[in-house]
Image: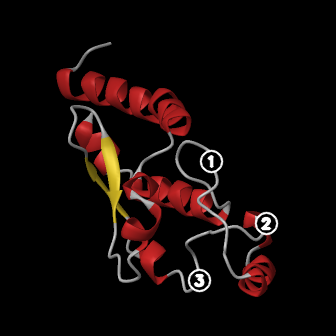
Amino acid sequence: MEEIVLSDQNPLKNEKINEFESGLRPNGERIGFYRDPEYAIFKQQLNPKADGTVDLLLSRRTASTLFVHKGNKNGSYTFGMTDTHNLVPKYGRDILGINEDWFKKRQNDVYRLTLVFNIKKNYKIG
């Protein structure tokens, strides 16, 4: 299963960028609010989807470096990135997590079927 998940980099990365665009942490809470109201207005104009809250996407250079890797616990995955803007220290390590509900749906809709296909193909079953 690990091989299947790690080969699914683009959809996982796109989902993480979508989450950032919405200004959300993996648990669905807001990442944060800007202290400077003028900057919040500026960001609202750049990305209305986050409604003026922190979206972690100014230049999108950091988001372009996102990749999925195996987490510390068995069967867990997390994101890594080149954090040139120190986003993890500012906003917390949890911003690198994967939304559990979305990931469970992905496992059921894609990974499960891929695993069954691979087993049938490799072991000539059914």
- Distance from the alpha carbon under mark 1 to that under mark 3: 20 Å
* Apparent side of residue 71 relative to residue 83 in the rendered image (left or right): left
The disc at residue 82 is none
Q: How is the rendered protein coloured?
A: secondary structure
User: In the rendered structure, are the residues bearing label 2 and label 1 in contact, judged by CB atoms less than 8 Å apart?
Assistant: no
Circle 2 residues within 10 Å: few <14, some 14–19, many ≥20 = some
Mark found first going from the N terminus, 1 or 3: 1
Which amino acid, mark 3?
Answer: Leu
31 vs 103: above or below:
below
Q: Which residue is mark 3?
A: 58
| Mark 1 element type | loop
Give the mark nearer the N terminus: 3 vs 2. 2
Residue 62 horizontal/vertical position (percent)? 43, 78
> Which residue shows up at 38% across the image and 74% down it?
65
**Decide: marks 1, 3 in contact (CB < 8 A)?**
no
What amino acid does circle 1 point to? Glu
Q: Residue at x 59, y 56 (%)?
A: 19
Q: Identify the residue under disc 1.
A: 29
Could you tell me which quadrant the C terminus lies in? top left
Residue with the mark numbered 2: 51
Q: Where 20 sits versus 26, above or below? A: below
**Mark 2, secondary structure of its residue:** loop
Q: Secondary structure at mark 3?
A: loop
- Mark 3, Cα crowd under 10 Å, few <14 / some 14-19 / many 20+, is few
The answer to which of marks 2 and 1 sits earlier in the sequence is: 1
Query: How far from the left and from the top, in percent, is residue 11?
Result: 49, 54
